């Protein structure tokens, strides 16, 4: 289902209307096994980030409440989303993304954890990267926050990719400090991205 929907959206948003503008394409790794992060202000950037990486498939982490409905559960899983308990993320929450990373898949996460511009980053992406020994591809979205506004004259959507963060090279005295340092680097890098 992911491949089918992504192709349709790519034809509409990228090919026909040319609404997706991407900067920093050279930073996208040739192989999988990395985390892509992005700021989160609405549902729009989820789609636009996927379009910027197309045809690479992104496995998005989503709050578990979205999977309670039987129909939505099937739909979200068919488009590569997987649930996580954001209020109480235990070790089991990390099993799926770490397994995906080790299978050379791309895991998408919005570290602010909520649709708020400028919200401080939570440590999920850094923790995953540390445990999986994976890299992080930071991205920033700028553009409309409502789908209907995309098709207006000023509705261009921008994804800016930053340089890949090799988390294995970030040091600290212990696991907790390393994760804090990875989070700080990611936050600073994301903040500096500009179109």
Image: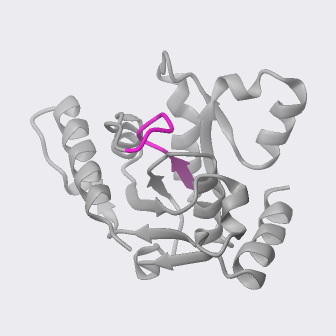
> Observer-nearest residue: 31 or 189?
189
> Observer-nearest residue: 170 or 118?
118
Magenta stretch in the rendered image: 106-117
Which scheme is used to colour this image of the protein?
Answer: one colour
Left or right of 53 in this view: 23: left
Residue shown at the point (34%, 34%) measured from the top left: 123
As drawn, which residue projects farthest toward the top? 88
35 over 111 or under it: above or below: below
Q: Is residue 91 visible?
A: yes
Q: Main secondary structure of the magenta part?
A: loop
Q: Quadrant of the C terminus?
A: bottom left
Q: Quadrant of the N terminus?
A: bottom right
65 over 17 or under it: above or below: above
Q: Is residue 57 visible?
A: no
As drawn, which residue projects farthest toward the front? 153
Residue shown at the point (50%, 32%) measured from the top left: 94
Residue shown at the point (41%, 69%) measured from the top left: 161
91 over 132 or under it: above or below: above
Residue shown at the point (79%, 57%) measured from the top left: 2
Task: Find residue 16 and report its horizontal and vertical position in percent.
Answer: 78, 83
Left or right of 49 in this view: 12: right
């Amino acid at each position: 289902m992911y491949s089918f929907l992504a192709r349709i959206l790519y034809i509409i948003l990228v090919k026909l209307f040319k609404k997706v503008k991407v900067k920093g394409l050279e930073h996208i790794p040739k192989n999988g096994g990395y985390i892509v992060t992005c700021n989160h202000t609405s549902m729009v950037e989820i789609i636009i980030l996927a379009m910027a990486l197309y045809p690479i498939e992104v496995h998005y982490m989503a709050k578990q409440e979205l999977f309670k409905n039987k129909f939505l559960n099937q739909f979200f899983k068919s488009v590569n989303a997987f649930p996580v308990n954001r209020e109480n993320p235990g070790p089991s929450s990390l099993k799926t993304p770490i397994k995906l990373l080790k299978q050379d898949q791309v895991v998408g996460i919005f570290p602010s954890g909520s649709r708020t511009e400028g919200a401080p980053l939570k440590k999920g992406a850094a923790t995953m990267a540390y445990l999986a020994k994976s890299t992080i591809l930071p991205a920033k979205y700028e553009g409309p926050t409502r789908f209907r506004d995309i098709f207006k004259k000023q509705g261009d959507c921008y994804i800016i990719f930053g340089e890949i963060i090799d988390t294995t090279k970030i040091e600290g005295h212990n696991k907790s400090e390393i994760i804090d340092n990875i989070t700080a680097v990611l936050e600073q890098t994301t903040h500096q991205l500009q179109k």
